[in-house]
Image: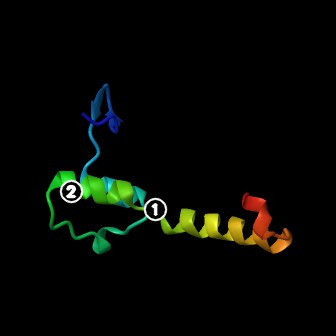
Amino acid sequence: QSDMGVIEKSNIRRLTPRETFRLQGLKDEDINIVVSDSQAYKISGNAISVNVKQQLLCAIYKTKATKKVSLFDFM
């Protein structure tokens, strides 16, 4: 059983696969689900939003660009 859900009035309902892809930043016209709901949940759950990925890579790049890294730092 999943713990993801949406509160509607006084009830909690499970997110639809389409809603999980929307949360990842996809537009409705870009969502074409041709697998089972459980596979769609897995795919969207394993995804990473482009905005989040971009921010992470920028942060990593800024850190590495401003810090001298030695081969011995990881030992």
Tell me which residue sits at (37%, 57%) in the image: 46
Residue 69, horizontal then vertical, whole percent: 81, 69
Query: In the rendered image of this protein, does residue 4 appear above or below residue 37?
Result: above
Query: In the rendered image of this protein, does residue 60 appear above or below residue 13?
Result: below
Which image quadrant: the N terminus? top left
What mark, if any, has residue 48 been given in the picture? 1
What mark, if any, has residue 39 been given in the picture? 2
Tell me which residue sits at (26%, 40%) in the image: 14
Which image quadrant: the C terminus? bottom right
Q: Is residue 1 left or right of residue 46?
A: left
Q: Is residue 33 left or right of residue 73?
A: left
Distance from the alpha carbon under mark 2 to that under mark 1: 16 Å
Query: In the rendered image of this protein, does residue 72 appear above or below residue 14?
Result: below
**Which type of secondary structure does the marked residue at label 2 adopt?**
helix
Residue 26, horizontal then vertical, whole percent: 38, 67
Q: Quadrant of residue 61?
A: bottom right
Which residue type carries mark 2? Gln
Tell me which residue sits at (56%, 62%) in the image: 52
Disc 2 packing (10 Å; few <14; some 14–19; many ≥20): few
**Which type of secondary structure does the marked residue at label 1 adopt?**
loop
Residue 24, horizontal then vertical, whole percent: 42, 60
- Residue extending farthest to the top is 10
Disc 1 packing (10 Å; few <14; some 14–19; many ≥20): few
Which residue type carries mark 1? Ile
Q: Are marks 2 and 1 in contact (CB under 8 Å)?
A: no
